[in-house]
Amino acid sequence: ETGVTQTPRHLVMGMTNKKSLKCEQHLGHNAMYWYKQSAKKPLELMFVYNFKEQTENNSVPSRFSPECPNSSHLFLHLHTLQPEDSALYLCASSLLGQGSSGNTIYFGEGSWLTVV
Amino acid sequence: GENVEQHPSTLSVQEGDSAVIKCTYSDSASNYFPWYKQELGKGPQLIIDIRSNVGEKKDQRIAVTLNKTAKHFSLHITETQPEDSAVYFCAARVAMDTGRRALTFGSGTRLQVQP
């Protein structure tokens, strides 16, 4: 148990489907992240949210749409994906600010996405 | 932006031997360097980290060294055990005062410890 919970753990979707990945953190953190992990790029940052505000979008295609309703929850809405989007999508959280624990990022177990 | 290179991509050692994984980074302003271990089917887990105001940090069989002048840092695992087998990632980050940066990761090292 890492304190960051992702659902579903596995998802298979067609290219015309709309689905969402969900992440919840129980660590009292105020920053949340989406990373993509694939054979080509092992850990690639997609989005960063600080205090529910998106502060970074790492040139991610619009078919990926993040949503952060509060500091504990993060969604990744998926629509009209391509087979090359198949990957492990990792959610992470951290506590912003100074201090010895301020920089540690904690990952969830990931959601395995297959686009067919 | 930051660029992190990690070597080797795969490493096989005999149980009881030491393993060393090396990373270099490009942004001299980076001041935080964590190492993550990812086991099969799981997310990465932090195993040790070091900040730029120290040169070495140890935690039991694991140690990390940092050379800021040369912009490289290394993970050392001594007395390796089969359960150390996993993929290890290094990372670097500039201080998140503004919250505008997250970690930049290396490409990973698959460590196999042979019993």
Image (cartoon, coloured by chain):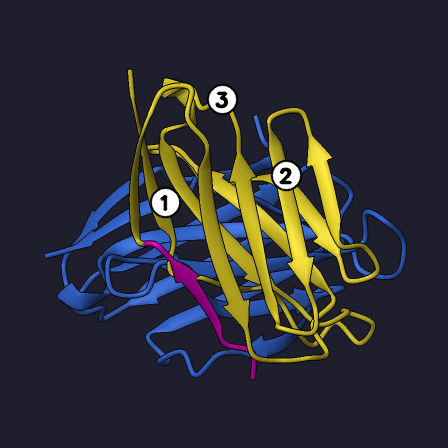
Chain colours: A blue, B yellow
Quadrant of the image containing the N terminus of chain B: bottom right
Is residue A44 visible in the rendered structure shown here? Answer: no
Of tags 1 and 3, the one toward the viewer is: 3
Which residue is label 1 attached to? Answer: A111
Going by the picture, which residue comes out furthest to the front? B17
Going by the picture, which residue comes out furthest to the left? A116
Which chain does tag 2 point to?
B
Are the residues flagged by discs 1 and 3 from a single subunit?
A: no
| Residue A62 horizontal side relative to residue B97, left or right | left
Which chain does tag 1 point to?
A
Which chain does tag 3 point to?
B
Q: Earlier in the sequence, mark 3 or mark 2?
A: 2
Give the Cα separation between the discs numbered 3 and 2: 12 Å
Q: Residue B93 location, x and y as percent?
A: 65, 67
* Callout 1 amino acid: Ser
Which residue is label 3 attached to? Answer: B79
* Callout 2 amino acid: Ala
